[in-house]
Amino acid sequence: MSSPYFNLAGRVAIVTGASRGLGQYFGRALARAGADLVITSRTLDSLRDFQKEVEALGRRAVPLELDVRDEQSIRRMAEAAAEAYPKIDILINNAGCNVRKPALEITWDDWNLVLETNLRGTFFVAQSVARKMIPNGYGRIVNIGSVTSVFGYAGLGPYTASRGGVKQLTMSLADDWGPHGITVNCLAPGWFRTEQNKALYENKEWVEYICDRIPLKRPGQPNDLDGAVVFLASEESRYITGQTLLVDGGISTGATKATLKKQ
């Protein structure tokens, strides 16, 4: 007998940045829980294989173009999603980017690229989708943050600024839209291997360094996020809003072997 909990049957979820990486893992998890999807990317061709994969799970997947740095693109996506389905229940606000450079080397354009994508884009996608949710009195918005929403790391100035902003933005939107039955939370992964950071994982010394600082002693695997994203998208999280859920193996505790030896 299947569990009645965390069941997304009959729900529709938009997943942005679904052409690769964590966006696809989020989409798979939601589809397996019963949701139909809108999947987005800057190019439709990059979504074709994933669309087929979701459909093979017995769920519907509507691919739409979205450039989160373009206001009109955001509005067109929200309108097309509302035309494809009678309602939108869930938004996984995942599209993002990064520029890794020492702070002294960050350019004006580097800053604008990261902040416009990760922070401004997150806000205006949420705004456009919330406008579709409010008439129904229901919504689950999950903004994707990072352990850098609460921690700073060298070489990630614009990125940490953007992810810290997503955390604060999440709390503000939760207060704004709570009266309309919409919860807004931030899912903050720790160190997961993605296309954006795969070069780091080719450095054995860096992997050992980061694992030493993770209490569970390993980087995250994409499926480690499945339960968290489905929970925040489900009815079971109905009284949770404005929160940041860190899925980071415990690295945010700040514990390391080095600190333990000093005790």
Image: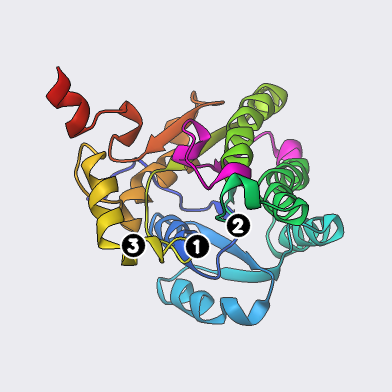
In the displayed structure, 91 sits above or below 15; it is above
Quarter of the picture containing the C terminus is top left
Q: Position of residue 246 (x, y in %)?
A: 40, 35
Q: Position of residue 211 (x, y in %)?
A: 24, 47
Indicate the secondary structure of the residue bearing disc 3. helix
Quadrant in the rendering for residue 81 = bottom right
- The answer to whether the residue labelled 1 contacts the one labelled 2, judged by CB atoms less than 8 Å apart, is yes
Numbered mark located on residue 201 in the image: 3
Q: CA distance from mark 3 to mark 1?
A: 11 Å
Q: CA distance from mark 1 to mark 2?
A: 7 Å
Question: Do we see residue 141 in this rendering?
Answer: no
Indicate the secondary structure of the residue bearing disc 1. loop
In the image, taking residue 201 as reference, residue 141 lies left or right, namely: right
Numbered mark located on residue 97 in the image: 2
Indicate the secondary structure of the residue bearing disc 2. loop
In the image, taking residue 15 as reference, residue 187 lies left or right, namely: left
In the displayed structure, 63 sits above or below 48; it is above
Q: Position of residue 223 (x, y in %)?
A: 32, 56
Residue occupying the point 86% across, 59% down: 72
Ranked by sequence position, the earlier of labels 3 and 2 is 2
The residue that disc 1 covers is: 196
Front-most of 190 and 99? 99
Question: Do we see residue 100 in this rendering?
Answer: yes
Q: Which residues are magenta?
A: 133-158
